[in-house]
């Protein structure tokens, strides 16, 4: 069970917290009609994601054995036999997608779209330069969209339409793109001459290109979030609440990740950094607390 749980990468479920963006930014965070299904949806979606992690480990078993860190993964090291990993992947996908459809057909369909995108990534897209990082970013957008679709599934008949600002989806896309490019840069520096053998697309990247992409996407991420917080429709929706006060937290979080990537030569696993880097974890907690405080504060 230990190798299986390790291959499920439960710590990566932190990425699926994006599903709660719809719950927070549509001000449904205190409504049990939406909160309970959202929590259930988080777990069903995460089971499906874990199923794809296992399937990806099976498909990449030979390449992972060339990676100095990934070769320690249970499937690549042989601690978890391939047939067992494949069976577990099918079971987790069935449970995750079945549970998601039980919550709502919109939510289930979005979860299925995410699984299909991840499968396309594992089979084709990760071998295509630039499309590999773009597909990862689109996965985060689907996560955020899934959270909104879940709310729509659970909304009572005749209820007000539930929408998530396009600017917030753009911000999620750029932030995920930033992390994906940072991960590619880390892999390129760690693998050096074996980069193309581990991942075909890595052979087409250079450190200079990735540094330029990081600069572009960093600016786009901060700009997208800033525009969202000060946009007239955002101010109108939240009754003039100063959501722009949370911009410094986003800026610090990006700066901190850049520091880890360039000064400490980290960046291979953003989820691990979130849990292990105290400064990042504290910053995320403070950002969440600030957002909740601002959005739930009585309107002026």
Image (tube, rainbow, N blue to C red):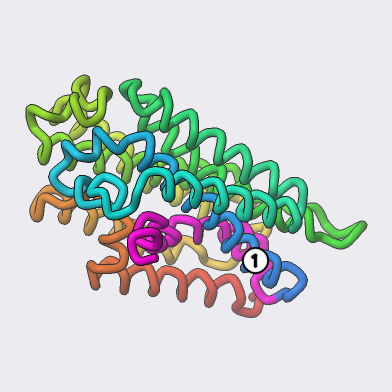
Residue at 69%, 52% (x, y): give it.
Answer: 98
Q: Which residue is mark 1?
A: 40
Q: Quadrant of residue 96?
A: bottom right
- Classify 296 as above or below 217: below
Q: Nearer the viewer, residue 162 or 126?
A: 126
Residue at 31%, 48% (x, y): give it.
Answer: 75
**What is the span of residues highlighted in magenta in the rendered image?**
1-30
- Classify 181 as above or below 129: below
Question: Residue 278 at x, y = what percent?
Answer: 24, 72
Side of 259 relative to 103 (left or right): left
Question: Residue 108 at x, y = what percent?
Answer: 69, 47
Question: Residue 237 at x, y = what percent?
Answer: 68, 59
Side of 213 relative to 299 (left or right): left
Residue 225 included in the magenta stretch of the image: no
Question: Residue 68 at x, y = what percent?
Answer: 13, 45
- Classify 256 as above or below 90: below
Q: Nearer the viewer, residue 77 or 68?
A: 77
Q: Quadrant of the N terminus?
A: bottom left
Q: Quadrant of residue 112?
A: top right
Q: Quadrant of residue 124?
A: top left
Tag 1 secondary structure = helix
Q: Quadrant of the C terminus?
A: bottom right
Residue at 8%, 53% (x, y): give it.
Answer: 263
Category of crowding for the residue at label 1, using alpha-carbon neighbours closer than 10 angstroms: few (below 14), some (14–19), many (at least 20): some
């Amino acid at each position: 069970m230990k190798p299986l749980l390790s291959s499920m990468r439960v710590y990566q479920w932190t990425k699926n917290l994006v599903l709660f963006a719809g719950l927070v930014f549509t001000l449904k965070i205190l409504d049990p009609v939406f909160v309970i299904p959202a929590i259930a949806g988080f777990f069903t979606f995460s089971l499906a994601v874990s199923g794809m992690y296992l399937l990806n480990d099976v498909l990449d078993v030979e390449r992972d054995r060339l990676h100095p860190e990934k070769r320690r993964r249970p499937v690549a090291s042989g601690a978890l036999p391939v047939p067992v990993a494949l069976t577990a992947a099918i079971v987790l996908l069935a449970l995750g997608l079945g549970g998601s459809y039980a919550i709502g057909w919109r939510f289930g369909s979005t979860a299925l779209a995410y699984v299909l995108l991840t499968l396309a990534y594992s089979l084709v897209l990760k071998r295509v330069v630039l499309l590999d990082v773009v597909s990862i970013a689109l996965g985060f957008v689907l996560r955020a969209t899934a959270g909104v679709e879940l709310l729509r599934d659970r909304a009572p008949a005749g209820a007000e339409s539930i929408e998530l600002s396009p600017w917030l989806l753009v911000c999620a896309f750029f932030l995920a793109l930033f992390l994906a490019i940072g991960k590619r840069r880390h892999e390129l520096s760690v693998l050096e001459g074996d980069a193309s053998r581990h991942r075909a697309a890595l052979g087409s990247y250079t450190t200079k290109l990735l540094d330029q992409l990081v600069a572009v996407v960093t600016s786009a991420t901060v700009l997208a979030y800033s525009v969202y917080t000060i946009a007239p429709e955002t101010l109108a929706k939240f009754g003039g609440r100063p959501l722009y006060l949370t911009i410094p937290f986003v800026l610090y979080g990006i700066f901190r990740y850049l520091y880890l990537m360039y000064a400490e030569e980290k960046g291979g696993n953003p989820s691990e950094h979130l849990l292990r880097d105290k400064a990042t974890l504290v910053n995320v907690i403070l950002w969440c607390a600030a957002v909740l405080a601002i959005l739930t504060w009585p309107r002026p």
